[in-house]
Image (tube, rainbow, N blue to C red):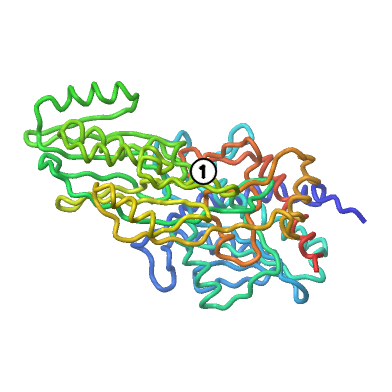
Amino acid sequence: MKIDFKKMLKPYKKESVDCLQKWIQIDSVDDPESADEVHPFGKGVASALEYIARLGEEAGFEVDRCDGYCTEISYGEKGNLISVFAHADVVPATGKWTYPPFQGVIEDGVMYGRGTSDDKGPAMAAFYALKALKDNGLIAGYRASLVIGGNEEKGGRCLDHYFRVLHKPSPAYGFTPDAEFPLIYGEKGIGSYLHEYELKSEGIVALKGGIAINSVIDEAHAVVKKQRGFKESAAQFFSLIGVKYSISEDASFQEIVVYGKSSHGSTPHLGVNAGLILMKFLGYFFEEEALGRLAEIYLETSGKLMGVHYQSEHLHDTTYNVGILSMENRTLRLAVNFRYPENVDLEEVKEKINALGIGKVEKIAGGEPLLFDPKSKLVSTLLNVYREETLDEETPIRTIGGGTYAKECKNTIAFGSAFPNRNDKIHEPDEEIHLSDFLDSQSIYARAIYELGKLK
């Protein structure tokens, strides 16, 4: 008997949109100040995890709050475990928003707010997919779970606790709705490092920018000792490159603020890095050539100007994103988010950067890239589900520079929820999700869980 998953999900339409809107209204940015043993990622994340936990209990699922690290919603007793991994934490709502970031405003069929597409919207779609399967008796012969983490954006401590402390089982097959359709069969390795540079000019008093290493800096600040010609030089410099800035001053100091454009750390070329542009200007004004050069080599985001550009057939090119600038005494620190294919040696990268003689990198920490066989059972099943539910036979499967829970979970792949040619402004102001996409993904996920449950 052929199951009409779209028809099966229709009764949940209004309820699912209402619940997503309420979930968006919870500010679930990681908050170390309110973190404790009960709320390891702060009270906002805890509230978001509790919200989905209560929805699960009301719907008749088994719910495990996992020591505050995750919310696990599950159903079924026998057979293979099919798992969906999503997250409730969000990146900070920086930049200028047209709509309040934590209200879930709906206009012309689009919901706006931080987390609408990364990752509360997809997580809620997966929840209603699971709910519809349970309500219709279609979780049989297999077990199903939805695991909502609370620390995906800040390092993945949630799933580390889930698997290594609580010893939860890995799924036979799983997916995470935290990327794009049709599916992602490979993910670059993700590393990070500090590039330290000793400032020569004593005119620079303070320099800072960015709040998340995996986002392009959209606003940067510098304080300098009051300098003749500073305003005029800034006007000339920033008018040439078309970047907005502002300057304020008192009797002794001048403060300059530069405004860029945020983007995800895996696609730094799509943003405008205010921190690097400010560094370049300061290097020019104070005649500190090395500072300007340091900015230039990172503004070229593939690593070519540093001699550390690598690429491979499936995972493509390296990317380097300076996500945070900070300064202590005379030491400027660039926190760099580094994405790389499977043919990269991290020690070699460090040695080549240090050989430039512009500051120093002490250590690069990183995880292994992920690459599935495009012909594997998991890939082929999910691709077939997507194509039959959408009738899209043209969009190819692909690899990404972004990191998802697929790296943290065995037998798991990134599957949606962004549809082809849709820009949901992840990690940017006015993040959004089209409600038609949100509803369509519910039937795709319901069918995916059901079909994976039939696999042997």
427 displayed left or right of 51: left
48 displayed left or right of 4: left
Label 1: few (<14), some or many (≥20) within 10 Å? many
Note whether residue 60 is visible: no
Which of 370/139 is in front?
A: 370
Where residue 140 sits: x, y (%)? 82, 69
In the figure, residue 109 lies in which quadrant? top right
Looking at the image, the residue that sits furthest to the left is 251
Look at mark 1 in the image and give the residue it sits on: 426
221 in relation to 147, above or below: above
Q: Quadrant of the N terminus?
A: bottom right
170 in relation to 295, above or below: below
Asked which secondary structure carries label 1, the reply is loop
110 in relation to 175, above or below: above
Note whether residue 144 is visible: yes
What residue sits 49% from the left and 61% below the top? Answer: 47
273 displayed left or right of 406: left
Tell me the kind of residue under disc 1: Ile
Which of 253/12 is in front?
A: 253
In the figure, residue 283 lies in which quadrant? top left
Q: In which quarter of the image is the C terminus?
A: bottom right
Where residue 168 sits: x, y (%)? 60, 75
Which of 434/383 is in front?
A: 383
Where residue 180 sits: x, y (%)? 62, 46
453 displayed left or right of 40: right
Where residue 104 sits: x, y (%)? 54, 43
